[in-house]
Image (tube, rainbow, N blue to C red):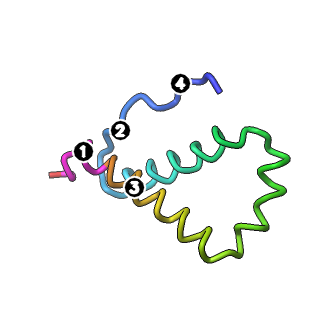
């Protein structure tokens, strides 16, 4: 993937920041597993696994923490 899509971590609101955190997390998965066939094949395995879902939430939370810090916590 060579497209430039992330030009800033600055967002207007915490809601936009959270949505950016989700995008960062999803893009991270796509970079890690660029083959869409394999990605979709594996989805049923983690979609119903509580540990996998919690791990995914942790990644989103970490990305949100990064975005929030970049935005001075919207102060």
Q: Is residue 40 left or right of residue 69?
A: right
On the rendered image, what quadrant is the N terminus found in?
Answer: top right
What distance separates the C-alpha of mark 4 from that of mark 2?
13 Å
Q: Alpha-carbon neighbours of circle 2 within 10 Å: few (<14), some, or many (≥20)?
A: some
Tags 2 and 1 in contact by the CB under 8 Å rule? yes
Image location of residue 55, percent across then percent down = 54, 65
- 5 over 11 or under it: above or below: above
Q: Is residue 74 left or right of residue 49?
A: left
Which mark sits nearer the N-terminus, 4 or 3? 4
Closer mark to the observer between disc 3 and disc 1 = 3
Q: Residues within 10 Å of mark 4 (few under 14, many from 20)?
A: few
Q: Which residue is mark 2?
A: 9
Residues at circles 4 and 3 in contact by the CB criterion of under 8 Å: no
Disc on the earlier residue, 4 or 1:
4
The residue to which callout 3 is attached is 62
Q: Are marks 3 and 1 in contact (CB under 8 Å)?
A: no
Using a 10 Å C-alpha cutoff, classify the residue at mark 1 as few (fewer than 14 neighbours), some (14 to 19) or many (20 or more).
some
- Which residue position is annotated with label 1? 71
Residue 45 occupies which quadrant of the picture?
A: bottom right
Question: Who comes first in sequence, dot 3 or dot 1?
Answer: 3
Q: Which residues are magenta?
A: 68-74
Is residue 61 rendered to the left or right of residue 70?
right
The mark that comes first in sequence, 4 or 2, is 4
Kind of element beneath mark 3: helix
**Residue at the (52%, 30%) spot, across then down:** 5
Nearest to N terminus: mark 2 or mark 1: 2
Q: Is residue 3 magenta?
A: no
- C-alpha gap between disc 2 and disc 1: 7 Å
How far apart marks 2 and 3 lie (CA) works out to 14 Å
């Amino acid at each position: 993937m060579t497209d430039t899509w992330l030009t800033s971590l600055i967002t207007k609101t915490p809601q936009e920041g959270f949505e950016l955190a989700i995008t960062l997390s999803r893009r991270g998965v796509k970079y890690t597993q660029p083959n869409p066939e394999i990605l979709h094949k594996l989805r049923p395995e983690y979609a119903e696994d509580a540990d996998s879902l919690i791990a995914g939430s942790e990644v989103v939370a970490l990305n949100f923490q990064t975005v929030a810090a970049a935005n001075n916590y919207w102060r």
